[in-house]
């Protein structure tokens, strides 16, 4: 099946960062041609007055938490955790499935085609992601047995999930040791061994708050990154979420180990974690950085366009320098750099021949996106807030949103189901 997306403004994100007026030909789930394409495709999609971008990549989320949207606002991390844990402990697998389905639809509608998740019951999340048609890297949470609400041993649950989902087309299983505050040395070693044995990577929370760093230092005498480096845990291909409270020596340790960082500016600001992840220093030292929304209860959405904007504004404000985290770099973080975080830069993150056809068409015939030109297209994408102008979203050559309509799920039914599930969950948690 071939599809020609015609007459768009194509923000390629190729190495030259070209913005071209033209077409994108999709064939067999891959990008077959870019530019002025002469071909007789099975289907033509008119993209006149539209921007075409590579699908956005959300490098850290807890997608099933959408049911907990706006349940713990205007409180610090401690109050937040207390509230969300109380609700989380009442959840049933159906809540996770419907929450994940809602999250996938929200992401598809706001231009995200790939996400990296950290949670338990990832089998339920995989089902929703597959049904929704999104590309999902799913990290099953691993933590010390005495600290979890999971039934059975977390490492065994994770292993069973990884084995069951290896080799699936859109789902890639990942090992997710939750963070040093709930993972002892033995748990970390088991997680690392499992990831290496199964040919996947580890995704974990790292140095999100100052409290977490100081507590770890009090217990072990070392800061989290120093500790993880010392026990031989850090390795190439890992993705660490947050990385807010890092020293320069820790930034270098991450760079040397080849650990990527998923920066979550909205979540960090909203929970008033204080501090700002040292992105310019990470770039200078060669750390690969992507962007993540974090869970819906600390964000309170999964909108990567907003994440790019907040990322840019946070660093400009913090550094008293309007030139840092410019629009192009923020788009890189959410596309090609996100793909690098996942070790998938040869398949994802830009519109180039041979790559997977994960594409988003943004209708610029709207007040907020007018005027759009080849020169201002990237700036409009970051600063003008185009998430509500996403007209089509394609994952591996298949439209999951087509001409504003969700094609993989019954949207009305899903929203009603999610609303009811959230109401039932809240009444249980009261
Ligand atoms: Zn998180």
Image: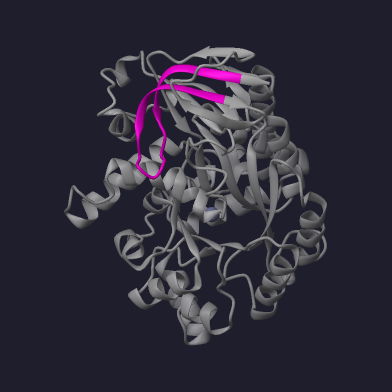
Say how the picture is coloured: one colour
The region drawn magenta spans 3-25
Dominant SS of magenta comes to: strand
The answer to whether 289 is drawn above or below residue 379 in the figure is below
Residue displayed at 55% across by 18% down: 4
The answer to whether 39 is drawn above or below residue 428 in the figure is above
Looking at the figure, which quarter contains the N terminus?
top right
Looking at the figure, which quarter contains the C terminus?
top right
The reply, left or right, for residue 282 in relation to residue 320 is right
The reply, left or right, for residue 221 in relation to residue 416 is left
Q: Is residue 398 magenta?
A: no
Residue displayed at 40% across by 42% down: 307
Q: Position of residue 28 (x, y in %)?
A: 67, 29
| Ligand 1 positioned in quadrant | bottom right
The answer to whether 210 is drawn above or below residue 34 in the figure is below
Q: Outermost residue, front direction?
A: 38
The answer to whether residue 352 is visible is yes
* The quadrant where residue 358 appears: top right
The reply, left or right, for residue 129 in relation to residue 275 is right
Q: Does the magenta stretch include residue 11?
A: yes
Q: Position of residue 415 (x, y in %)?
A: 63, 24
Residue displayed at 61% across by 15% down: 41
Q: Outermost residue, bottom direction?
A: 221
Count of labels in the image: 0
Q: Where is residue 322 in the image (x, y as percent from the top left)?
A: 18, 47
Between residues 165 and 216, which one lies in front from this camera angle? 165
Between residues 35 and 324, which one lies in front from this camera angle? 35
Between residues 8 and 233, which one lies in front from this camera angle? 8
* The quadrant where residue 419 appears: top right
The reply, left or right, for residue 321 in relation to residue 329 is left
Q: Position of residue 157 (x, y in %)?
A: 79, 60
The answer to whether residue 430 is visible is no
């Amino acid at each position: 099946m071939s599809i020609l997306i015609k007459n768009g403004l194509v923000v390629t994100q190729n190495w030259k960062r070209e913005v071209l007026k033209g077409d994108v030909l999709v064939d067999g789930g891959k990008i077959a041609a870019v530019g002025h394409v002469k071909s007789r495709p099975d289907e033509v999609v008119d993209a006149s007055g539209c921007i075409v971008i590579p699908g956005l990549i959300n490098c850290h989320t807890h997608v099933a938490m959408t049911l907990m949207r706006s349940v713990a606002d205007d409180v610090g991390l401690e109050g937040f955790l207390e509230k969300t844990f109380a609700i989380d402990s009442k959840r049933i697998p159906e809540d996770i499935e419907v929450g994940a389905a809602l999250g996938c639809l929200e992401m598809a509608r706001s231009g995200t085609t790939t996400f990296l998740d950290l949670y338990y019951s990832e089998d339920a999340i995989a089902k929703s992601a597959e049904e929704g048609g999104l590309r999902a890297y799913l990290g099953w949470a691993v933590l010390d047995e005495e600290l979890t609400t999971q039934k059975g041993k977390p490492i065994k649950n994770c292993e069973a999930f990884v084995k069951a989902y290896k080799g699936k087309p859109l789902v890639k299983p990942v090992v997710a040791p939750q963070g040093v505050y709930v993972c002892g040395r033995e748990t970390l070693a088991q997680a690392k061994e499992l990831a290496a044995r199964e040919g996947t990577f580890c995704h974990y929370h790292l140095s999100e708050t100052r409290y977490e760093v100081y507590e770890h230092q009090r217990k072990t005498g070392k800061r989290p990154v120093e500790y993880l480096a010392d026990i031989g845990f850090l390795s190439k291909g890992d993705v660490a979420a947050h990385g807010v409270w890092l020293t320069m020596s820790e930034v270098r340790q991450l760079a040397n180990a080849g650990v990527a960082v998923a920066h979550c500016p909205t979540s960090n600001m909203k929970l008033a974690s204080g501090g700002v992840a040292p992105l310019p220093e990470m770039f200078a030292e060669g750390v690969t950085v992507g962007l993540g929304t974090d869970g819906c209860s600390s964000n309170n959405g999964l909108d990567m366009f907003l994440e790019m904007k907040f990322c840019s504004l946070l660093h400009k404000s913090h550094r008293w320098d309007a030139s840092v985290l410019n629009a192009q770099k923020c788009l890189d973080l959410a596309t090609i750099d996100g793909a690098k975080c996942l070790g998938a830069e040869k398949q994802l993150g830009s519109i180039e021949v041979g790559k997977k056809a994960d594409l988003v068409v943004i209708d610029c015939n709207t007040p907020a996106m007018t005027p759009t030109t080849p020169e201002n297209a990237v700036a409009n994408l970051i600063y003008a807030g185009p998430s509500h102008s996403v007209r089509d979203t394609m994952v591996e050559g298949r439209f999951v949103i087509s001409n504003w309509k969700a094609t993989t799920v019954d949207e009305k039914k899903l929203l009603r189901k999610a609303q009811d599930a959230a109401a039932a969950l809240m009444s249980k948690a009261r």
